[in-house]
Amino acid sequence: MGISISDESKFKQNELEDLEKLLVIARGQNNCINLNLVYMTFTLNEQNYDKVMNYFSERGIAMIQDDIEPDVPAYSCEGEKFRPFDPSKIDITMKPLTLDALLKRIRNDEIEFDTSFQRKAGLWNKRQKSQLIESIFLRIPLPAFYFDASDDGRWLIIDGLQRVTTLREFVVDQTLVLEEMEFFPELNGCSYDQLPRAFQRRIDETVINVYLVNPATPANVKFNIFKRINTGGLELEPQEIRNALFQGNATVFLQECARLDSFLAATDGSVKSERMLDREFVLRYISFCYLDLSDYTGNIDEFLNEGMKYLNCADTGLLETIQSEFIYVMESMYRIMGRNAFRKICRDGRRRPINKAIFESWCYVVKKLSKHQVECLVYNRDEVQEKYMDLCEDNDYLYRLKAPDRKMVYMRIGDIQSLVDSVMNADRGNHG
């Protein structure tokens, strides 16, 4: 449906053009559009919110609202893109390998199949797995395999998990039998042991190209290689990659903290666990509250990677302290902000999604408060929320929430600290 005459009187020309573009996007998504996309296109406020919503409603477009605001892009205030790593430090070698050699590694537990970071190893159905084996019989070249070879005794799969898993199930575990074969239907129902030796030999002698990310490659470079190379059926989220590359204290600790009742209450259960987003939030708390902020360059992935290293080097006593303080901060935020914790608060009464930058800022400030200061904020929570509502109407503050560089991080933390100080100063004045 096009723009009506009445619409033209409500919107500026550039707004009409953006609305038309969003409408096309929504039409291509079963007449649905994510509210965050609308927020990123328009500066919605009390004056224009209703008319923008009515525009889509009149055209049969449903709004979908995620409960986590999307990440900001890795750009500085001036628009300069951060360089994620030094390309000269990429150290990858390619070596031809027979499948028999790869299978020997599988048999000797020298390939990491831990799927806790999940791309999930079981994405392929039996037909897809059988046709991979059939491709080997037909001598069709397989795509390249990528491994992190930091530990030569236990390679970590970067790309090729479904293929390696299929080979393990068919040849090593022998839990897979062939089905729905196209060129060799006579082999349907066969396990590896039931194949004629000629077919077994074709598997063993097939040559594949294997790319190894060598141990000298820095962790942050590996992180970016992992993001760029992985082509599995389920694209990895950054925290899933971190969970794969930094196995140890960090992975176990983040999982434990993400399940704590205090965290679930403070976030109102809005931070989902399916793609490890909940663990990323815990890691953000640890990185911003325990690392030196002067080391933050504006590249959030690099900073969170350092947080994983920090946890992996922490002893039991430090981990217990971190968890205890994390629980206290989460409980304090819930007592102060209730169901609005870590969200923008606006006068229209609509509940906003959780915002990562707000989460980091409030955690940083509240962690440094004494118990007496926290109790002061709890006692004056109505005033805290009212002042924060005012702050959320400040366009400068809203801009700082979207800017990832270090200066803006310091400034938005300063905004929260100033708010907290003003409430505590007023409380002291009221009580002599």
Image: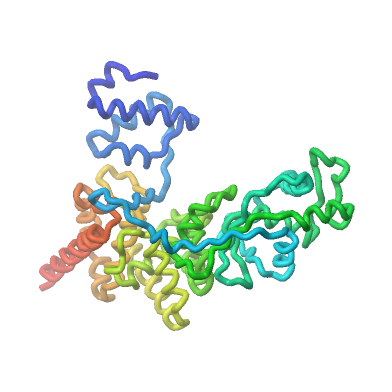
Horizontal and vertical percent position of residue 305 = 42, 66
Determine which quarter of the picture holds residue 375: bottom left
- On the question of residue 366 being in view, the answer is no
- On the question of residue 70 being in view, the answer is yes
Q: By what rule are the colours in the image chosen? A: rainbow
Q: Is 425 placed above or below 97 here?
A: below
In the image, what residue occupies the spot 41% across and 74% down?
A: 310
Q: Is 398 placed above or below 224 here?
A: above
Q: How many marks?
A: 0
Horizontal and vertical percent position of residue 415 = 20, 60
* Residue nearer the viewer, 370 or 290: 290
**307 left or right of 168?**
left
* Residue nearer the viewer, 427 or 26: 26
* Residue nearer the viewer, 324 or 322: 322
Residue positioned most to the top:
5
Determine which quarter of the picture holds residue 165: bottom right
Quarter holding the N terminus is: top left
Determine which quarter of the picture holds residue 379: bottom left
Horizontal and vertical percent position of residue 193 = 87, 57
In the image, what residue occupies the spot 44% across and 79% down?
A: 314
* Residue nearer the viewer, 123 or 162: 162
